[in-house]
Amino acid sequence: MAINAAVLGVTGYTGQALIRLLHNHPVFNIVKLISTSQHGPYHQMVPEFFDVSLPLVQLYDVDQFDGIDIVFLAVPHTKAMAIVSPLMTRYPALKIVDLSADFRLTAPKVYESTYGVSHSASILLAEAVYGVPEQHFSAISNARLCANPGCYATAMILGLLPLVGRVDANAPIVIDAKSGVSGAGKQPKPASMFCEVHDQLSAYATGEHRHSAELVQETGFQNALFSPHLVPMDRGIESAIYIHNPDIGDSVTQWYQDHYRAHPFVTVMDTNTQVSTSLVTGTNHCVIICKPMGDWVVVFSLIDNLMKGASSQAVQNANIMCGLDQTTGLNFK
């Protein structure tokens, strides 16, 4: 059995990671590479693919998706909404995994206040399924449109889900998260230039980061202060989640292990494990380490931002949407 796949948006970091994953996938077959701005041999756009046989990149046109079973959208935020609506209208059987933020937030007003633009396909927000398989597996399996989560959001949500219902939704939570520079995307920006990030650590968007809206929507925690930081490495996220709650106690690790026991891509490690993004680099895994400290608990949630935070989670969601085992093509280290 082969499932015909297309990737729209192929030159960014997530697009490149998607193509590498799909090229090695035992079931998905890349039949189209599509761009909104470039066309030609893929290796001329991304030279490290010089030895990989891939279709020529075509310019996007809504008429070119006949015979496609699933499409991955790796286009910038605010650009996917204009693509998804006509695709879903024209191809009722087509499944879509959108790696942008355009369908992650279910309330149009929340989307508009978070991203500063009106949503041109807001009617589809109610149909889109938020793509955290550890939370929405059943809904994803029946979805036409899956909204792949943000990278910080994935780490934070997985780090807090076992506490939903155990900790008051208004409890103060502090999240100190650090990400590699690839999380800023491939488009050149002054803040992500080598001289701005090398040998430095910088905080940004404290209390204002867009992924906070996903955290509130998916966990219900209303009083979480999220402070992201950029660190001079290419990939990886470490989210340190600080919760002051005397009722949590030393059983917290057991709570997490019980919660994630049936989920193959979340591993809860012993409290004495050294916290390091090297545990998850290049994988679809989230590693969680809980450290109870008196009336406090610190939950460390680690992912690779380009993998579980983007492209490999997109493949995990696609596996589920297409009725495959969710681990297909993702068991690697």
Image (spheres, rainbow, N blue to C red):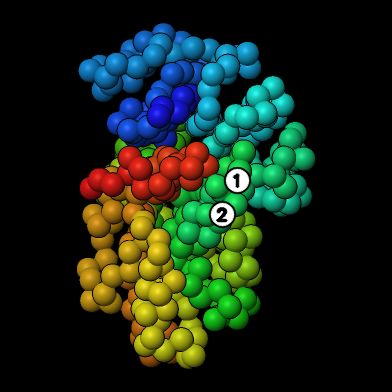
For the point 56% across and 54% down, which residue is it? Answer: 138
For the point 51% across and 75% down, which residue is it? Answer: 163
Type of the residue with mark 1:
Asn
- Residue 233 visible somewhere in the drawing: no
**What crowding class fits label 1: few (fewer than 14 Cα within 10 Å), some (14-19), or many (20 or more)?**
some
For the point 23% across and 71% down, which residue is it? Answer: 273
Residue 207: which quarter of the image? bottom right
Mark 2 lies on residue: 138
Mark 1 lies on residue: 142
Type of the residue with mark 2:
Ser
Report, in whole angstroms, how far the alpha carbon at label 1 lies from the one at label 2: 7 Å
Against 269, residue 8 (above or below) is: above
Q: Is residue 99 left or right of residue 92?
A: left
Q: Are marks 1 and 2 in contact (CB under 8 Å)?
A: yes
Q: Residue furthest top?
A: 40
**What crowding class fits label 2: few (fewer than 14 Cα within 10 Å), some (14-19), or many (20 or more)?**
few
For the point 62% across and 38% down, which residue is it? Answer: 144
Q: Is residue 275 left or right of residue 42?
A: left
Against 244, residue 83 (above or below) is: above
Q: x%, y% of residue 229? A: 41, 55
Q: x%, y% of residue 291? A: 33, 78
In the picture, which quadrant includes the N terminus? top left
Q: Tag 2's secondary structure? A: helix
- Residue 38 visible somewhere in the drawing: yes
Q: Tag 1's secondary structure? A: loop
